Amino acid sequence: MIGGLFIYNHKGEVLISRVYRDDIGRNAVDAFRVNVIHARQQVRSPVTNIARTSFFHVKRSNIWLAAVTKQNVNAAMVFEFLYKMCDVMAAYFGKISEENIKNNFVLIYELLDEILDFGYPQNSETGALKTFITQQGIKSRHQTKEEQSQITSQVTGQIGWRREGIKYRRNELFLDVLESVNLLMSPQGQVLSAHVSGRVVMKSYLSGMPECKFGMNDKIVIEKQGKGTADETSKSGKQSIAVDDCTFHQCVRLSKFDSERSISFIPPDGEFELMRYRTTKDIILPFRVIPLVREVGRTKLEVKVVIKSNFKPSLLAQKIEVRIPTPLNTSGVQVICMKGKAKYKASENAIVWKIKRMAGMKESQISAEIELLPTNDKKKWARPPISMNFEVPFAPSGLKVRYLKVFEPKLNYSDHDVIKWVRYIGRSGIYETRC
Amino acid sequence: MTDSKYFTTTKKGEIFELKAELNSDKKEKKKEAVKKVIASMTTGKDVSALFPDVVNCMQTDNLELKKLVYLYLMNYAKSQPDMAIMAVNTFVKDCEDPNPLIRALAVRTMGCIRVDKITEYLCEPLRKCLKDEDPYVRKTAAVCVAKLHDINAQLVEDQGFLDTLKDLISDSNPMVVANAVAALSEIAESHPSSNLLDLNPQSINKLLTALNECTEWGQIFILDCLANYTPKDDREAQSICERVTPRLSHANSAVVLSAVKVLMKFMEMLSKDLDYYGTLLKKLAPPLVTLLSAEPELQYVALRNINLIVQKRPEILKHEMKVFFVKYNDPIYVKLEKLDIMIRLASQANIAQVLAELKEYATEVDVDFVRKAVRAIGRCAIKVEQSAERCVSTLLDLIQTKVNYVVQEAIVVIKDIFRKYPNKYESVIATLCENLDSLDEPEARAAMIWIVGEYAERIDNADELLESFLEGFHDESTQVQLQLLTAIVKLFLKKPTETQELVQQVLSLATQDSDNPDLRDRGYIYWRLLSTDPVAAKEVVLAEKPLISEETDLIEPTLLDELICYIGTLASVYHKPPSAFVEGGRGVVHKSLPPRTASSESAESPETAPTGAPPGEQPDVIPAQGDLLGDLLNLDLGPPVSGPPLATSSVQMGAVDLLGGGLDSLIGGTNFVAPPTAAVPANLGAPIGSGLSDLFDLTSGVGTLSGSYVAPKAVWLPAMKAKGLEISGTFTRQVGSISMDLQLTNKALQVMTDFAIQFNRNSFGLAPAAPLQVHAPLSPNQTVEISLPLSTVGSVMKMEPLNNLQVAVKNNIDVFYFSTLYPLHILFVEDGKMDRQMFLATWKDIPNENEAQFQIRDCPLNAEAASSKLQSSNIFTVAKRNVEGQDMLYQSLKLTNGIWVLAELRIQPGNPSCTLSLKCRAPEVSQHVYQAYETILKN
């Protein structure tokens, strides 16, 4: 299991060091600094083996988190734990920075003591942890016996993510369907790969221990239900989507999903990610990028890029940004664009074209002349793809929330009393067109 | 609250100041001081001098302060064991505290204080905590048992904590169960033989129930533990799989991977005809693909594992090529791994897309990545024949870019393409020759030289090209020198008239001016061949080359199976067994996949031999694309090159007459006399003087067709049962023919005549090929020896045992019947050598359930001796490797009825018993093949 956990700043100075196993010595701290942080080469692997000791690392801004072991640990678990550690720290004190870590080092040690025992990860749900580890130190003296046992039963319990006795005057929940649409297109407009990775994020402010059931236009579910009423299948069948795969927050009863494909759970209080999913079929690609690059002699490039929006004219896309890479030996650029603002950014080797808003079924164009310095560099310019960023108010996968039912048998509020909000946001993931 | 001030360094006298503050009366000041101490400790300063002062702060009801003191204790207790005892009282007291959080804290910390003296005091509180009413305390105590075991294993056993821990597996709280499982698994690892984690259907059921309820981490512990279990039959395996599959939708990638591990392992036991088997295969693909949308570090772990899964079960991901396309922003380690998997998944169906991608990658920036992409294009050409043409033209395009490393890499792969598709793409040679000057890497130079030598007859200025390399001969690397030597000899054999001078030059450079024994020896061999028999030289040097394999970097099947058992762990990331990177006794238990049918064998083989592969060693593969020259000379690995008929004259060094002798026939070049294969003397060494003898000694076992092992004659038919006729006999196989050597003795008082023999139908169709001929009547007390030739074309009937032969012998007195068992090795045919790729493909192809493993005891032979011994009985060594200090021989043999048997013989130096694994499509022969092995090796 994990033998030790170290946190370093960008210079390689140790900010936190916690050793769980005897086989990890102090020299491990230095070995990682010398061989990885101070290594001249780019990092070639997130797992490094130095003198029979394995180091796993992740980086958050300029902070390095490293887990160390001498055993054949579950590598996936170690990385999952490191990410979780980052989440927990962020939930306690915000951004993971050198300053924040130094300011909270006592808290971090306390957390490390709680969530990792002898190198075995323990309950690391922030909701539960916050009931007994706080920035003001542990609030234990004033706890009653009931409170104490409530804490321990939550930390170890079946529903470790929610405590009992939560009360709200107004029962309310928010559902965000957040999708990022990824595309790789050939210069000729052929889709090389496209997929949507989506998340359903829920914010729940519900009293008691509510039992929730979430439904969406999943093809399998709809086809199953449609069996009885044939005509309905044809009607609703069109709007259903084929989900390639999905994963759920640990509150969701996986065995129930496996057998009935129904998503039922008792939600944590506050914000959490209910599910992630991936679709690859029938994706609505909100934008099409048509590039045209022409080399005029050895010292000039002409670039023309057309973007077309491909959704209902009544909807508005926002924060549109097109990034057109330029060769390293660019000496000057002239740009003309119909809409928005475009600028050549020498430091990023790219022309960045920004448009604030754009309605559906529209088209816009940019053209640029790029002057090149003559070079005798034999190496060809790699022509990185043109990438795009945007935000649209619909789900490119076509996912629709059909219902979210809430049952709380013990308290007297019903599904109708809960105020529910649903929002769809589609963002660009890696949305690239080769040129 | 800002704690960062504690990190600011103060100057000298700091320790003294801290001491004062620690002993202050004010609580706040005390706490501040302890924080400062911890901060100093973190930055690596030695603050152990403050031990007594810090321990004094321990007795407080402020939990935060207490935790800080504990942290300090865990760090320094070991350096101050006597002082640490001072803390014991507080711990014991805290273990009785009404607050469960404090009880747990105490027991957790106590386990971390690794001082022997403390452990005694720890036992009682721990015992109580293991039975605590609060689950939080119990789950902490469970881990504490593992901690204590790490310090003092004996104590844990003596105190009976292991039993308590086992009881916790039935605890009502899922987290307690999970931690108990984790602790037991760890303890069990250091006692591989113990039956600690006594998994049975009941306890498995408990674990599966807890699986649905515990935290994500607990699920990982439980799944990893489940993976060690071997279900008793396929039905149990299926029911466990059914309950594990829902985990594939978990958000935590480690849970998913561990579930994949369980499924991959138990799937081995399911029959492929089962509907469920197909369903399961389909269910595995989506979660594996989803792993690729995780953070890059996890993607890397996932990709390394997918690489294994694709090798084990290519069908799972064969339609998912697109998801492995490299993204521009992927970190380099993800890119390289994706590329690897792309090559493995490339097939006729998706080759167009793959090629387009690879071409794109070849223009990227990262040199390693670009090289790998170029190489991948070559691999595609070799793997998918239909694409070869397109690949070659893509490679030519890349060569046109003139980017140095791209060109070199392209030439290296084109060499392989030439070998795979001879006489197809040689038109591109001209283009390659244009780039001769830009090659500066040994591998590329060697490849180019090989091409020039191999196609010397098509390249007009081949001699000039090779000569240009010869100028700097001594500055070249060995690889290039060897290649140059061979290429020039090839050139000479093809164009003898113009290149005499060149060949003399290179031979003298290699033999006289070089310190490298490999080079010198090869030089001598060529020299000798050329001077004695150029026709034979041509046969050897220009021999047909074995095909190169389609797949490279395949992990050896046994290692692959072991790694499948380690999915998700570091071993699967390194692609090495844990023994290669874990120190000491932990984790060196070899794991293997369960056999398909229910069996009493445990999944974990009890071998615990310390097997440490050198960390640098890649899990390299049998069919690694063979070094061309290696194949030519490593006679024991290459195809059975017919031995050159060597004259017995001694080598004449520097003979002027180098090209005399057979040269005429060479230039005439019309009649090629096939060397008489059978006539090669068994030992070529003796008559040849000089250093060559050693070299040929090595090969002495190869070309010889001496017969296989012959058992001494045994009495088959005693005289008492056959009215005075005693028959004893044995079976032999010599130069491809089987015979039954009989000895007939007349122990009766009358003369015997009219002998005849007949066989009953038998498993391999053995039948007498000629009548039994006893020329003269057999008088009393006379003995005759007869060799009866046998054929294998008789009628076939499966016998029990398989090698049973029922014989009837007739003479003037009566007909007698007897049965005998013939050794299977008389059925091993001479052409039983499989080539390496075939071997690997066949090995993979034969289902695992057909594998049988045997131990051959008391056989203190080394690999060479065993190999040559077996070879004389027509068991051929296809390849040999050394893994973790053990020699692995991969062998093939073919029976007269065309059944192939593949074998892996593991020999450990110093250990008299070796392990034999046999794979065959007709598994019933395995037992008999094993017996044959045993007989041959022991005699």
Image (cartoon, grey):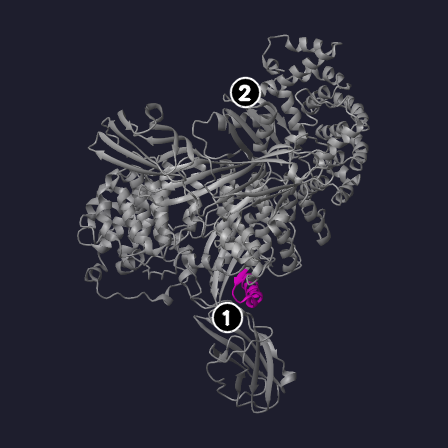
Q: Which chain is disc 1 placed on?
A: B
Question: If the image is split into quadrants, where does the N terminus of chain A sit?
Answer: top right
Q: Position of residue A266 (x, y in %)?
A: 66, 39
Characterize the magenta stretch by its predominant secondary structure. Answer: helix
Q: Position of residue B767 (x, y in %)?
A: 50, 80
Q: Judge whether B84 appears above or below B624 on screen.
A: above
Q: In the picture provided, is B299 more to the left or to the right than B379?
A: right
Q: In the picture provided, is B455 more to the left or to the right than A277?
A: left
The answer to whether marks 1 and 2 mark residues whose Cβ atoms lie closer than 8 Å is no
**CA neighbours of label 2 inside 10 A, class few (<14), some (14 to 19), many (20+):** some
Asked if the stretch drawn in magenta spans residue B906, the answer is no
Where, by quadrant of the figure, is residue A328 drawn?
A: top left
Residue topped by disc 2: A98
Residue topped by disc 1: B826
Residue B577 visible at all = yes
Q: Which residues are magenta?
A: B918-939
Type of residue at label 1? Ile
Q: Position of residue B186 (x, y in %)?
A: 67, 41
Residue B611 visible at all = no
Q: For this rendering, which residue is in front, A73 or B193?
A: A73
Where, by quadrant of the figure, is residue A271 drawn?
A: top right
